[in-house]
Amino acid sequence: MSKFIFVTGGVVSSLGKGLASASIGKMLEARGLTTTTMKCDPYLNVDPGTMNPFQHGEVYVTDDGAETDLDLGHYERFTNAKVGKDSNITTGKVYYSVIAKERKGEYLGKTVQIIPHITDEIKNGIRKVAKERDVDVTIVEIGGTVGDIESLPFLEAIRQMRWELGTGYCIFIHLTLLPFIRSAGEHKTKPTQHSVGRLREIGITPDILLCRTEKTITKEQKEKIALFCSVDREAVIEAIDVKYIYEVPLHYQKQGLDDLILRKLNISRPEGDLHKWEDFVIKRLKSPKHEVKITVVGKYITLPDAYKSIYESLVHGGIANDARVVINKVDSEDLEKGNIAKILEGSDGILIPGGFGVRGIEGKIRAVEYARENKIPFFGICLGMQVATIEFARHVCGMKNANSKEFDPSTQYPVIDLLEEQKKVRNMGASMRLGAYACHVVKGTHSHKAYKKENIAERHRHRYEFNNHFRKDLEKKGVVFAGIHQERNLVEIIELKDHPWFVACQFHPEFKSKPDKAHPLFQDFIAASLAQRSK
């Protein structure tokens, strides 16, 4: 039977529970254990698929087509665990299921209540993931902060699981803020004490505390926290700010967090080895031989989490090429009227990520034109491929005002059109083309050189697609259709013949990249950008 680690957070949000959970998974895998990680989100949306990127950040997509929280991206980047539809439970999903059961009469006339029905649904969801993944340890991150009203059913559910499973099968790890007050010149432990106090009020006593801090914690401060929070001295772990997120597992391991977890779970395993991770990832991050400047032209630039996987994948591509990637973030609206040559000057490569809606589109099209005409390596992803198609149709094929039907339903040249099955869709949630689909890569292309194979599978999240009616017209002018979903003859990758590196794909390669195994397209894009820099 799987054992469980529940990770909670207090004081403020954005302390890094997702990174902590992923790092714990990495350490346990280094000890020879199999793990899976899941996230419980307290919001009422069934999934984040219809949420504004400025509110939620990136929507991460799994192989099986689930739209999930971005923390699941951290889980897959750090560990070998596979996540799917059941790995992200929301309050909306829980209530949706319970109400559906009530309508069917499955509760046999009983009054449906938060306890036991909602909490039972949460527990069943957690146990289902543990059973189906068949792992040694299941790590469960509880979203939100202690004290939030909406988080209470999840906290009650894991309290009950601790009681049901017993000592040695379940532990609680609490991530809390330890602020350093500069005027006083010291850390303040009260926020941590109050956070743990709130947890204990609802029946949860943490086994381990991760104290997020910007300054090193003294032995005396650790003892004070241990005393007032009723935890062992060795269970107060420093979670200090680091320059690179991939340092976090190493920092925890040096403090013996993995040994502590195994003891509390009554698991015996040999010492963990993260030397390969440290040698390949960290050393190349800190002391690379090269440097490259990549400009990302996006619609949601002001919120870093909106393109989280994109930024991390660029870093991975840099690691693979022993290069530091300097990311220049440009809002596409600034390119609509601004001096584009001045704004994009010095770019070794230009990347346009995914997105929805007409805002900023003309700025993206100008960026594509700049990259194409100046022979700068270009990487378009999802919407990035669509605007690349529009730009080529307008400026090379002479299709004046060519567009996507998403932006101009009456365009004379709809080079991007709604997928056939999408024309009948009325409900927006979970109705896009989602998840992994097969793609055949044409030999002799940049994409084939990167992948080194003809048959791949990549994850999708879109409603609009390249319009095959215009395929021959673009092909005559120099577009190479480098990747095709053969079952339905859908264009997945386009390239340009007379360009050193111009690749645009309909899918999202950033969802399958890892720091120690960069995605082939990101690795090749950074290599091409380095070659551009050397010129």
Image (cartoon, helix red, strand yellow):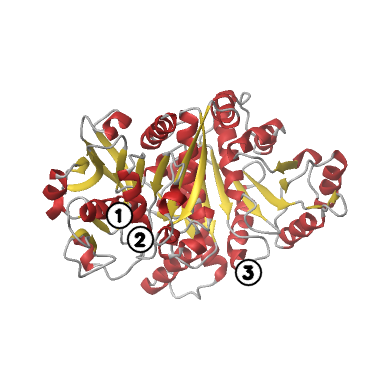
Image point (57%, 67%), residue name:
115
Is 256 drawn above or below residue 76 in the view shown? above
Mark toward the viewer: 3 or 1 = 1
- Residue 430 point in image, percent of width and height: 35, 61
Residue at the spot 68% in from the left edge and 65% down from the top edge: 147
The 10 Å Cα crowd at callout 2, few under 14, some 14 to 19, many 20 or more, is many
- Quadrant housing residue 414: bottom left
Residue indicated by mark 3: 149
- At label 3, counting other C-alpha atoms closer than 10 Å, the crowd grade (few under 14, some 14-19, many 20 or more) is few
Q: Is residue 4 visible?
A: no
| Residue drawn at the location 64% of the way across and 40% of the way down | 243
- Sequence-first disc among 3 and 2: 3
Q: Mark 1 Cα within 10 Å, few/some/many (few <14, many 20+)?
A: many
Q: Which mark is residue 361?
A: 2
| Image spot of residue 225 (x, y percent) | 82, 48
Asked if residue 201 is positioned above or below residue 255 in the image, the reply reads below
Q: Is residue 66 above or below residue 449?
A: below
Structural distance between the alpha carbons of marks 1 and 2? 7 Å
Mark 1: secondary structure: helix
Q: Given contact means CB atoms under 8 Å apart, are the residues at marks 1 and 2 in contact?
A: yes
Helix, strand or loop for disc 2: helix
